[in-house]
Image (tube, rainbow, N blue to C red):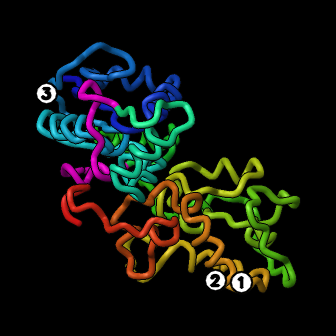
Amino acid sequence: MRARVSTEWLSGCSGCHVAVVDLHEKLANLVEDVEFVRVPVLMDEKGYPKADVGIVEGAIRSHHDREAAEHMRKSVKTLVAFGSCACYGGPSGLGWLYDQKSVIDETYSSGPTNVQGQVPDGQVPVLEDGVVPLDEVVEVDFYLPGCPPHPYFIAAGLRALLGAQAPPLSTKPVCAECTRKMRKRPGVELQKAAVTAPDPELCFLSQGVICLGSVTLNRCQAPCPANGIACTGCAGPSADLIREPHLDLRTMVAKRMQMLTGVAADDVARYVEASAKTFYAYAVASPAVYRKPTVELREWAGDAAPVPAQAGKEA
């Protein structure tokens, strides 16, 4: 008997759903074992049919998202947070930095393309007071981060959920897949705003470019460093960052760059703080990040408002 799979698309770009198509011939094999009963980008199914596995993309941004997540949780046996938005809030999570009123005022009262003061009426979903990951609203059984998740990990994850033998999913960081070599290079300066570096064989950190590969979970197989672009952390925090409350992205990267180049760790940390919306973009709304005692994301990003109490399960 084929397993029934239902999917939902919340506050996200649908890229995670599209990534399933990148399975190519593996998708054809998967269809032999799976019956898709709900896929918003492929079929016109308004309800939530009973299913064995529910796959949810996107963060909780509106009342509609919250209600959809609750419907999915009730209709499936196993729920998967699919992609970095569902797991950590993702880029949508930048809305967590600001309260509902400031977002609406900025968009509709002072926006250059709107008539001042005109705001959406009751015909559109009401915004939540913040943006939160899926597990702040409903219980999640499995997590598959990535922006979007790599087809290899999608296939492995689905095979495991369906009871088939699948390769173990490593908890190593992106650096484990990167072929660039770390080398001490005293005197190298911090390359602010740089996303690439001249030497294709050398670690970005050794060249003064901030790369998040050492603090990001490998759910991508490191395509960005292989193609000359520093890791931006799209798969979310590495396992050690999540497990250890005293570890933080900026201090770990700063320490490693200082060891390789001599650039003062404090200078690197301050630069990361000043660019928090960039370096924390994929997990800014995750309690695993913002509740660390050394992290002050709202202050670094210029908005020190308290966490909205109704944004998730608890403040």
Packing grade of label 1 (10 A; few <14, some 14-19, many >=20) is many
Q: Given the image, on which type of amino acid does mark 3 rest? A: Lys
Q: CA distance from mark 2 to mark 1?
A: 5 Å
Asked if the residue under mark 1 is in contact with the one under mark 2, i.e. CB atoms within 8 Å, the reply is yes
SS for callout 3: loop
Residue picked out by circle 1: 258
Identify the mark at residue 50; answer none if there is no mark: 3
Query: 102 or 15, which lies in front?
Result: 102
- Residue 35 location in percent, x, y? 27, 21
Residue 142 among magenta residues: yes
SS for callout 1: helix
Dot 3 or dot 2, earlier in sequence:
3
Residue 46 among magenta residues: no
Q: Given the image, on which type of amino acid does mark 2 rest? A: Lys
Q: Residue at x 66, y 47 (%)?
A: 223
Residue picked out by circle 2: 255
Query: 154 or 296, which lies in front?
Result: 296
Q: Residue at x 24, y 34 (%)?
A: 64
Residue 174 shows in the view: yes
Q: Quadrant of the N terminus?
A: top left
Q: Quadrant of the C terminus?
A: bottom left
Dot 1 or dot 3, earlier in sequence:
3
- Residue 14 location in percent, x, y? 44, 31
Q: Is residue 150 left or right of residue 157?
A: right
Query: 230 or 305, which lies in front?
Result: 305
Occupied quadrant, residue 178: bottom right
Residue sitting farthest toward the top: 44
Packing grade of label 2 (10 A; few <14, some 14-19, many >=20) is some
Q: Is residue 146 left or right of residue 244?
A: right
Start-end of magenta stretch: 120-143
